[in-house]
Image (cartoon, rainbow, N blue to C red):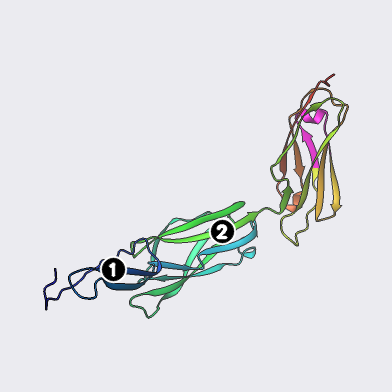
Amino acid sequence: PIPPGAHGTVIGTFNADRKRGEKTTVILVRGSFANTPLRLELHTIIRPIFDVKPEQVRFGDVLAGAGQSGAAPQEIEVTARAPFEVMKWMRLPPGIMIEPIGAPVSTGFREESKRRFRITLGADAPEGVLSSSCIGATSLNTNLEIMVMANITGPVRYNPNSARLAFGIWDAGEERSRSVDVEPSLAGLILPAPTATIEGDAAAVMKVEVQTVEAGKFYRVHVTIPASAPPGSYPGLVRLKYPPASGIAEKGLTLSARVREKRG
């Protein structure tokens, strides 16, 4: 009950821990007074402790070992609730380097400030898909997180890329073959023709040939098991080697095949 002539205060406490961006909250006040219920609307813009733009640093396709010449450094802008310093990078993927650019600059909103960082992908970044976050401990007692993505590839692309040629199981007297295409991983690269040899039990029955589809750009490694292959299991390895001057690492393709007695 609110007696005539009385007055007071309605206090609402808002927790923004799990909110971000624009937020509208409605409070309904009901009581023994005219025009009940009273509708109170609160409009809020929740600004994060750290706002990173762009949200993800994307280097795209990068040739392994090329380092800064293969991937241009990227820059991000971090808006923070107050000027800050990164005290220590607690998580930094191999090959990633981060350095601040200049000093914090005020945004004009309270103590909020922004500063830029340069992210570099170094030559020691390993081959593979890089999709990870860089986490730094800051002077604001809140971690700064920066997402980094890249596809770091060697100079050669193999298709299929499973590194395995499985022939399966079949009856004696049938010929079977499998192929792997060999191409440069990035446009503009010149790829020398590899040499191919077969190792292991498969060498006794399988034959391998490197076919030049387009010199410098496209080769096909063709492995055949002739119809004359006797019953048995034939594990092995196709070893591809490139000229030493190319700097391209050799590649091993696992072989597996099983020839069974022909069924009547």
**43 or 124: which is nearer to us?**
43
Q: In this figure, which residue is indicated by the disc labeled 1?
A: 27
- Separation of disc 1 and disc 2 at Cα? 44 Å
In the displayed structure, would residue 141 be above or below residue 162?
A: below
Q: Which mark is residue 149?
A: 2
Range covered by the magenta-colored residues = 196-208
Neighbour class for label 1 at 10 Å: few (<14), some, many (≥20)?
few
For marks 1 and 2 on the same chain, the one whose residue lies earlier in the sequence: 1
Q: Which mark is residue 94?
A: none
Indicate yes or no whether the magenta region holds residue 200. Answer: yes
Image spot of residue 215 (x, y percent): 85, 55
Horizontal arrangement in the rendering, residue 169 relative to residue 121 (left or right): right
In the displayed structure, would residue 171 be above or below residue 108?
A: above
Identify which residue is drawn at 81% across, 44% down. 221
Identify which residue is drawn at 81% across, 20% down. 261
Image spot of residue 208 (x, y percent): 83, 38
Identify which residue is drawn at 85% across, 26% down. 229
Of badges 1 and 2, nearer the viewer stands 1
Horizontal arrangement in the rendering, residue 22 relative to residue 161 (left or right): left
Neighbour class for label 2 at 10 Å: few (<14), some, many (≥20)?
some
Identify which residue is drawn at 53% across, 60% down. 148
In which quadrant of the rendered view does residue 186 lie? Answer: bottom right
Looking at the picture, which amino acid does disc 1 mark?
Answer: Ile
In which quadrant of the rendered view does residue 224 lie? Answer: top right
